[in-house]
Amino acid sequence: MKKSFLNISPLQLVPVIAVLFILVFQQESRAQFDEYERKAGIINTFAKYVNWPSKAFMEGDKLVLGILGDDPFGDVIDNMFRNRYVNGRAWEIRRAKTIRELKGSHIVFMAQGFKEEEVKTFLQEIYSRNNSFVLTIGDNIPNFCKNGGIINLTPNGLYTLNIVSANKAQLTIDVKLLNLASDIIPYDPN
Amino acid sequence: MYEKIAVKDITSCSIKYKIGICIYQSPFSKAGAEPYFKYLIEHSCSDIPAEKYYYYARLLHYKENYIEAINYYNEYLEAYEQAVEQSVFKDARLRIEQCENAINLSKKVTTGNTTSSQVMEIPINTSYDEKSPIISKLDNFLIFSSKRQRDSFNYVYGDQYRFLPEKLQSNDDDIYLSYRKGIQFHHPYPQFNEDFRDIYPLYIQDGAYMLLYIEYLTDPVGKGNIYETKVKKGRWLKPKKLNDKINSEHNEKGAFLANNGTTIYFSSDRPGGQGGYDLYKSIKIGKDDWSKPINLGPTINSEYDEIYPFVHNDNKTLYYSTNGTLSIGDFDLVTSVKEGATWSTPQNLGVTINSPYDELQFSQIPSKRYSYFSSNRQNKDAIGGFDIYSIFKPVHKMKRAIVTGNIEVEKNGQKIPISLTVKDQDNITYKKYVYDPDPSTGKFFMILLPGKNYTITVTHNELELYNIKIDLPKDTYRYQLIKTFKMKDIVVLNKTVGYDIIPEESQFEVTTFDQIKDKKEDIADARYDALLMLMDMIVDRTDKDGLASLNALDDPALDPVISQQAKGSPDPYYTPLLDLIERAFNEANPDLLTSLDSMRGDTGDKVVRLSKENNSILDQRYYFVENEFDISREDQKTLNDIASFIKPRSDLRLEIIHFSQENENHEIKETDTLTQMRINSINNYLASKGVEQWKVKVVEKPKMSSDDTGCLKLSIIIK
């Protein structure tokens, strides 16, 4: 039951079809990993190079990431962090619109879309209490570090780091994070 | 007759009860009994035993009205509350459990689950009992048993009758064989043409060997045995009874050969089991004997019946029928998988395949695409009595990504022929559907599974030139890659020692299935399908193994995309990204971090050695004037060349080899001061020319020839 077109040599057909496909579709260029896949990956690495005091893990063994605001990651971060461990701790991801709902988080990722005043209030709320061992990460938020945030992701793929805020939060930052920071803020915003 | 009386005495409860029980026995329409029992319950016929609840519950159960059925089973139990009839309680409670199973399993049926059973058409099924469908491994013929009239085509539809009239009844029983004709089957033909009380096939191998159950007219009623037979000169030989290890003085129901005929699985109600019929296995010893049967244990066997085992070609998936607590009513098909030495907890095949009636004698082709079983269910599709049903598992349409583009390597202005090897993150090599670049255009073509990371190794004359890493996101429809390289000879000391591979152009584009959908290019999907079909045909014509491996992809159990993320392991798709980020931090290399959104991850060998066998790409000997360690002016020149070659290349290492010397007693002397000074002198010279110390290693080797005397050898090797 041979069909006629099958009599053409298969190897001749392959390039023909390949060319046909290339011609048929208008292509869209797209980065290998998209922006928030890269940012999720960087958060995972930050967590590796930040040392929390042991009393920060009173609630259990998990490392809790709170995403504040409109979640830009979608399920990317869940898929990436599932079954991955940071210094032996599994990830837990929480999403909320208020700091109160994110209580117990070790990292708070602040999404874009907040006004500067709101950001200030959130940061004050986080660091107002003693022993709030929270690594705050801003998603390219203006004056995030100046307002007391610890790491602010910048559009060039790097980040700004406020070492004083990190110290106040009793977090030890590995030198590796200092090496790659595009800007280090060595002063107390207050 | 009762129906005739009932016309005269339309209110008699006991007549109605008897009519109800009669119709309940019908092989075609038990449901006809429902109004009679309903009448008895609604009219509180006190002279009728509480069995009326039981029969009514059974009828509701058969109608798949499980919740109501549970209510009436409970009524029945309450009526017998005072009685101490254990069997009554046990049966009704089992039925309640089975109704609950059905309710739970119904919840699991998801929309889009298209695996369901279909009754096979006449002439496979008739209004008589058709049972024991056994499909050949090659899916080219089906054998089964039928009680049809052998010499008649007098097929009647059961739904015209509650019981067949006498003239249509049949005393015949035979095994029939039907060859496949496309998706249908040819007219089946009887195989034995003898008189049996009962006969049905159990196992078939290549159409030339069969295991079967026969109850001859001379056997006690209901006590048949398991036989085997072979084909000789186109006819089945007289069946030979299996020995008493298999055929006991008790009853056997079903037998199946697995592991190339070396293991027999069978069901028997012999004592010593878990209760009722149990599944056993026995290993073949010599030509005709079997080992002592082993009970498959309490995971598989229960106090109820387990009958008709079938073992899939993989020798680890067991199907059988049970009427115990796993069932949703009467016998149901269940499956269990052997994991090492133990069987997994059996699972019901679900409500799309099982019914509250009997489902028996499962059989399946190795690809699992077609399965068959028999059932006496009475729904609108049933043809009558036991019928044969088929299960077609639709092909799981697996998305595959097309990787196309150009890969070119140019040497001295000429394109050189290259070939590609593709490996995924698990180091599995992909050979099928990988077509090397056309030597004139550089166009290549491959079909890969999306959701994985691949390394494409470019080779020329078996020399590995470059590794290109690509990541195919899960929904990749097409990945287009353009990479061009220049290959340059590396000349050191007037010798070609290898090639530099310099990446020139580097581009890629990913088109996802979503992007095609957005453009509403429905035609794209059709073209994609057509291409995949074409590829299948090409592989079919050129590579049978390739096709087999493609077919394996259709099976979700073997589906690498579905199974690639083992439970508890992270999604491997993100691993390269995370590794790269970590590398950026470890190396304090901001460029790596900032360039994550562009092409990345090439791990090309910058230097390609000329031959694989020889580890070193350049050897140079340095001889010294006796008792001197200064380097001559001439040697300094060659060392300059070597230094400038090594300096910019991080993957090269330099070995300074000195040769061990023996004393008069053939003992190896320790390195003398002079040799050490010569080594230092070369090392220091190289260091002064900028060669990093970590690239240089001093090695001692035994002296092989007189050439080695008083000399140091420098070898350049690729890390």
Image (spheres, rainbow, N blue to C red):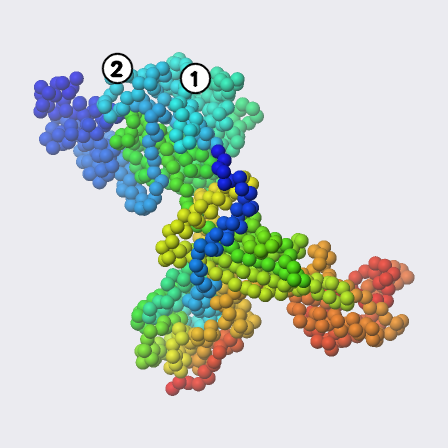
Q: Identify whether B83 is placed above or below B111.
A: above
Image location of residue B408, percent across then percent down: 59, 59
Viewer-side residue, B630 vs B658: B630
Q: Is residue B254 visible?
A: no
Q: Name the residue carrying label 1.
A: B192
Viewer-side residue, A76 vs B16: A76
Q: Is residue A132 left or right of residue B650?
A: left
Residue drawn at (55%, 73%) of the image:
B588
Viewer-side residue, A66 vs B73: A66
Assess whether mark 2 and mark 1 are in contact (beta carbons under 8 angstroms).
no
Image location of residue B233, percent across then percent down: 52, 17
Q: Secondary structure at mark 2?
A: helix
Q: Earlier in the sequence, mark 1 or mark 2?
A: 2
Q: Secondary structure at mark 1?
A: loop
Residue drawn at (34%, 16%) of the image:
B152
Quadrant location of the N terminus of chain B?
A: top left
Q: Name the residue carrying label 2.
A: B166
Q: Is residue B337 left or right of residue B442?
A: left
Q: In the orientation shown, which residue stands out farthest toward the top?
A: B218
